[in-house]
Amino acid sequence: MSYEKVKQAKQLVIGTKQTRKAVDRQLAHLVILAKDADLLLTYPIQIACEDNHVSYTYVPSMKELGKASGIQVGTAAVAILKD
């Protein structure tokens, strides 16, 4: 599951703004988006991923995505950076 990928990642960026920057700068290897987040937050990142040929996937919960990322609050988006 993608939560495990996030936990095992060496380099992450957390949050919609930082994820979008990583995608636009082609630093992202994989983007994980939360299904329960507002589409106004996640849809532009999805489009940026498609435009920049970056893989993305959805997980069910913002809260669990934040937890897997090592933060105390939920997050709508996380990017695993290229090595």
Image (cartoon, rainbow, N blue to C red):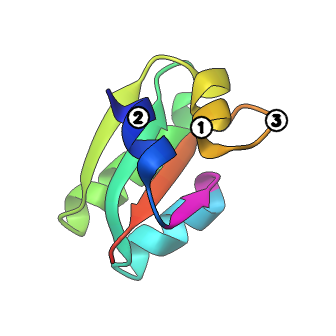
Between circles 2 and 3, the one closer to the viewer is 2
Q: Residues within 10 Å of mark 3 (few under 14, many from 20)?
A: few
Residue 55 lies in the magenta stretch: no
What SS does tag 2 mark? Answer: helix
Point out residue 67 in the picture as x, y percentages from the top left corner: 67, 32
Residue most extreme to the right: 72
Report which residue position mark 1 lands on.
76
Report which residue position mark 2 lands on.
4
In the depicted view, which residue is nearer to us: 56 or 1? 1
Circle 3/circle 1 CB separation < 8 Å:
no
* Earlier residue among tags 2 and 3: 2
What SS does tag 1 mark? Answer: loop
In the depicted view, which residue is nearer to us: 81 or 39? 81
Instruction: Check the image and report above or below for 17 versus 16.
Output: below
Q: Which residues are magenta?
A: 11-16
Q: Quadrant of residue 59?
A: top left
Q: Which amino acid, by three-letter code, is at mark 2?
A: Glu
Circle 2/circle 3 CB separation < 8 Å:
no
> Image point 59% across, 37% down: which residue?
76
Point out residue 37 in the picture as x, y percentages from the top left corner: 59, 26
Instruction: Judge left or right: residue 35 versus residue 73.
Output: left
Point out residue 45 in the picture as x, y percentages from the top left corner: 43, 52
Q: CA distance from mark 2 to mark 3?
A: 17 Å
